[in-house]
Amino acid sequence: MKFNYKRLFFNNPVRSIVQVFFAVSFIVLVLSIWGFAGTHNLCPWAVIEVPILMLRHGSGLFFVWGILIGLLGIISTFIYPRIFCGWICPLGTLFDFLGNIGQKLHISSKRIPHWLNEKMRIFSYGVLLLIVLATIVKGSLVCQIACPAFWICAVWKIYIPIATAIILLLWLALSLRVKRGFCRYICPYGALLGTFAPISHYAVVRNLEVCNNCNLCNLSCPMGIDITQELVVKSAHCIGCGDCIKSCQRNGLEWASRKSAKNLELSN
């Protein structure tokens, strides 16, 4: 299949099928087992928020599945950078789709310069810190106020506060304007995984002998990384999706260990 970065879905068929599977599984499990308000039971952010609430209230362990998923997401990032975000997260799937719709409707923004895209990651760390502090002070799940996953499942059952509706509309507008804008600049769990992504065992490596700087890899990257800037992709934005590899018409990109890639860098 020829890679078309403006396709609504299935640019990378294997990844898309895996994404749809986990997104559907998430909704079915939440609604059938825990009910409309049960998204926290599968939310990886529980790995941070639950320990805080346990200490705050002196309670026992809860949201165990969410904690396990959160830990697995962190562990997997030591192998492939943020692979949870690129292949499993249901919100990532939604924002991939919304970003493609934005491109189809010609309302997506121009490509954000690589240096600015990288600098703007600081917002996600700000969100992470804000949620942690608010959870400590209030002793409740403050994250659900603006959590897209929670409200997608709960919107049919409970009233949405006006402030929450405004924030969700902002997430929608951001996602249509900037592909995976929420994942890049807002998601606290993505920020957490991003701290480990640059030290993952594997990274995308560019073969300088065959690369002709056609820019297809950059156009295909859902996180706006300038892949042609370096021999090895080191950006904490990388979500291990492999779309850049799939898009290359000359097989100039591949997964390789960072150790071997570092040796290659030194030899060049």
Image (cartoon, rainbow, N blue to C red):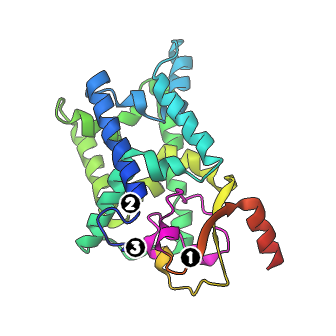
Quadrant assignment, res 253: bottom right
- 239 in magenta: yes
Q: CA distance from mark 1 to mark 2?
A: 18 Å
Q: What is the number of the mark on residue 13? A: 2
Residue at the spot x=53%, y=35% of the render?
70
Above-or-below relation of 25 to 118? above
Whether residue 141 can be seen here: no
Provide residue 170's location: percent of width, then percent of height: 30, 54
Above-or-below relation of 85 to 55? below
Mark found first going from the N terminus, 1 or 2: 2
Q: Which residues are magenta?
A: 219-247
Above-or-below relation of 89 to 27? below
Residue at the spot x=62%, y=40% of the render?
75
Q: Name the residue carrying label 1.
A: 251
| Mark 2 surroundings: few (<14), some (14-19) or many (≥20) residues within 10 A | few
User: What amino acid is found at the position of numbered circle 1 in the picture?
Assistant: Asn
Quick one: SS at disc 2?
helix
Provide residue 63's location: percent of width, then percent of height: 45, 23
| Mark 1 surroundings: few (<14), some (14-19) or many (≥20) residues within 10 A | few
User: What amino acid is found at the position of numbered circle 3 in the picture?
Assistant: Phe
Mark found first going from the N terminus, 3 or 1: 3
Q: CA distance from mark 3 to mark 1?
A: 13 Å
Magenta stretch, main secondary structure class: loop
Provide residue 44's location: percent of width, then percent of height: 48, 36
Above-or-below relation of 248 to 48? below
Front one among 250 and 103: 250
User: What amino acid is found at the position of numbered circle 2 in the picture?
Assistant: Pro
Q: Name the residue carrying label 3.
A: 3
